[in-house]
Image (cartoon, grey):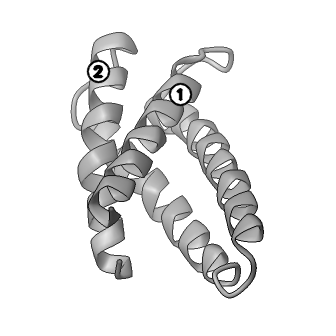
Amino acid sequence: MRYPVALALTLLTETPIYTAALVRVGRVRPGREEAAAVLVNLVTHPLLWWTLRHWTDGPAAAYWTGFTLGEAAVCAVEALLLRPLVGLRPRDPLPWLAAGTANAASLLAGLLILS
């Protein structure tokens, strides 16, 4: 999959999930959460994409280890960035839940398209 397609798929999958979670559960005003969802993905997606490129020539186990660690790091960074962007309290678990759900959904969408 080419990078622009992967980024578009990520944004199309994750933005509605972040929007639903942050507006309905977190009571963030509409519009702010969409911008936050796009922004966090524009920070994390290229970093993961270009980092994983270095693992594709090695053994499959190395790739999947890097992929798993990379996805976990992406979820953490997105959750940490979301909190101040949408004005949630420091101990609010919503950014962590939203980031995990959004990234799992986009990962699944990508795997379904590739299969």
The earlier-in-sequence mark between 2 and 1 is 2
Give left or right: position of 1 versus 83: left
| Residue 102 horizontal/vertical position (percent) | 41, 38
Q: Nearer the viewer, residue 34 or 12?
A: 12
Quadrant in which residue 91 is drawn: top right
Q: Give how far apart the Cα atoms at labels 2 and 1 are.
A: 12 Å
Residue under the image location 61 percent in, 82 percent down: 53
Residue under the image location 28 percent in, 47 percent down: 13
Q: Amino acid at mark 1?
A: Pro
Q: Quadrant of the N terminus?
A: bottom left
Callout 1: helix, strand or loop?
Answer: helix
Tag 2 residue: 23
Q: Amino acid at mark 2?
A: Val
Number of marks in the image? 2
| Residue 9 horizontal/vertical position (percent) | 28, 60
Q: Quadrant of the C terminus?
A: bottom left
Tag 1 residue: 95
- Dot 2 surroundings within 10 Å: few (below 14), some, or many (20 or more)? some
| Residue 16 horizontal/vertical position (percent) | 24, 37
Quadrant in which residue 47 is drawn: bottom right
Tell me: residue 111, above or below residue 35.
below
- Dot 1 surroundings within 10 Å: few (below 14), some, or many (20 or more)? many
Q: Nearer the viewer, residue 29 or 101?
A: 101
Residue under the image location 68 percent in, 61 percent down: 64
